[in-house]
Amino acid sequence: MTADKPVIHVQGLEKSYKDLRVLRGVDFDVARGSIFALLGSNGAGKTTVVKILSTLLKADAGTAAVQGFDVATQAANVRESISLTGQFAAVDEILSGRENLVLVARLRHLKNPGKIADDLLARFSLTDAGARKVSTYSGGMRRRLDIAMSLIGNPPVIFLDEPTTGLDPQARIEVWQAVRELAANGTTVLLTTQYLDEAEQLADRIAILHEGRILVNGTLAELKQLLPPAKVEYVEKQPTLEDVFLALVGDNGTKESR
């Protein structure tokens, strides 16, 4: 697969449930090592797209490929190329963080599961909490552990389906940092979200999905150009709520084990 060819290619994707048309011809490409945000409200069809791309659901029409493999005819190859993190952390609360990671590494028949677990704990700033039961973790720590588990085996593509749903502001910032680090390490990320600020903070490209159709697809700068240019006026800049929040609690939440 050539470097300039999209890692994810979607064309004309359609899906209906009886009379409900969930997807009405969805098209987009995702470049290697980028973060692509599929932005839309509840019911827009975001999770349906992810399920089709991860071979959990068959499309009614259209084509989709991941890493050059057709999701309909080469499902096994697609599954070997991806990892999926759903809307709720799929971690075992009875086990420790390290034990969760070791378990998944063993299930994947990988060598040195202990080293794999330790490396991922360090990468996601969870080393100090690695021996603790996951039931004692904060929401952000659980989500970071969940993402770490999905990276075992080094999949080149990861789907994150609304990864910060239900998290508090500090936990959301922790997950954002983890997602940025994924792309920095070369992982291609397809992120679904209903949060405008999340797409704005993370994505290299943003596609707005509404009622089963892609309305626009582009960089943040390109999307902003769709509106009339802003008037230039002198305005005293006030601190944002995020500035206040980070000033009070600190911006190193990913380094803490609460």
Image: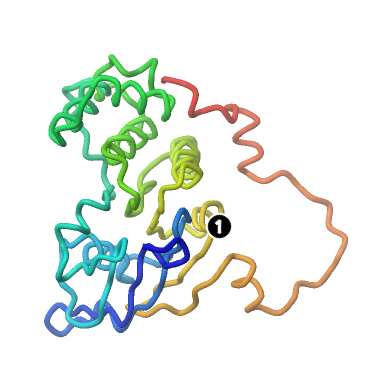
Q: Is residue 92 rendered to the left or right of residue 162?
A: left
Q: Quadrant of the C terminus?
A: top left
- In the displayed structure, 133 sits above or below 184; it is above
Does the rendering let one see residue 216? yes
15 left or right, relative to 121? left
Residue at figure coordinates x 21%, y 78% from the top left: 15
> In this orientation, which residue lies closer to the viewer: 136 or 117?
117
Q: Position of residue 181 (x, y in %)?
A: 48, 40
Quick one: label 1, few (<14), some, or many (20+) residues within 10 Å?
some
| Direction from residue 175 to residue 242 in the image, left or right | right
Instruction: Point out the image quarter for the N terminus.
Output: bottom left
Residue 160 in sight here: no
Which residue is more in the foreground, 14 or 185?
185
Name the foreground residue: 120 vs 170.
120
Horizontal side of residue 227 vs 71, given as left or right: right
Residue 81 on image: x %, y %:
26, 53
* Residue position marked by numbered label 1 in the rendering: 200
Q: Residue furthest front?
A: 2
Residue at x 56% of width, y 52% of height: 201
Percent x, y of residue 25: 31, 83
Q: Under tag 1, what secondary structure?
A: helix
Residue at the location (33% across, 51% down)?
158
Position of residue 111 measured from the top left corner of the image (x, y, whole percent): 20, 27
Total marks placed:
1
Q: Describe the colour scheme in one phrase.
A: rainbow
Three-letter residue code for mark 1? Glu
Quarter of the image for residue 96 reads: top left
